[in-house]
Image (spheres, rainbow, N blue to C red):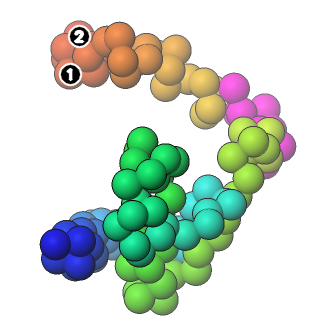
Amino acid sequence: MIAKVRASVMKITAVSMDELASALPAPITALPIRGGQSGFPKDIATQRRPPYRVGRLDHVLQVLAEVAAERGWDICTYDAKNVEAEAAAILGPRADEVLHGPRTTLGPPWSKTIGPRLQQQS
């Protein structure tokens, strides 16, 4: 069953990535993924124990990386603890607008719906 689910996830991810790539004006060359992934265990006994049972993203990121690598995209990892500071250094004076503007404009997604808010703005 796990092998069937994994094959299905890989297929759907591949289709989704292909649709994304064809919709963009320029080719995708890299996929940034949070660093420090240890890989998702293959045996069910380990998968049923924490931390895997409680929703870690490692297995999702692993699938994304595998499918991206099949397409020849570079996998770039970043340190989640430093990513905002690194982005701010690259963005310079635009950093606050780019990094915090959407939250200020739209509000947190867990407390507001985006649809009605976007309709009000148009």
Q: Which mark is residue 1?
A: none
Rendering coords of residue 7 (x, y %): 22, 79
Q: Amino acid at mark 2?
A: Gln
Q: Which residues are magenta?
A: 88-96
Q: Secondary structure at mark 1?
A: helix
Q: Residue at x 62, y 32 (%)?
A: 99
Q: Amino acid at mark 1?
A: Gly
In the visual, does 8 lie left or right of 27? left
Is 93 magenta? The answer is: yes
| Residue matched to label 2 | 120
Q: Residue at x 45, y 62 (%)?
A: 46
Quadrant for the N terminus in the image: bottom left
Contact? badges 1 and 2 (CB < 8 Å):
no
Marked residue nearer the N-terminal end (1 or 2):
1
Residue 98 placement: quadrant: top right
Front residue (pair 115, 34): 34
Q: Is residue 118 visible?
A: no
SS assignment for the magenta stretch, majority: helix
Rendering coords of residue 40 (x, y %): 48, 67
| Residue matched to label 1 | 115
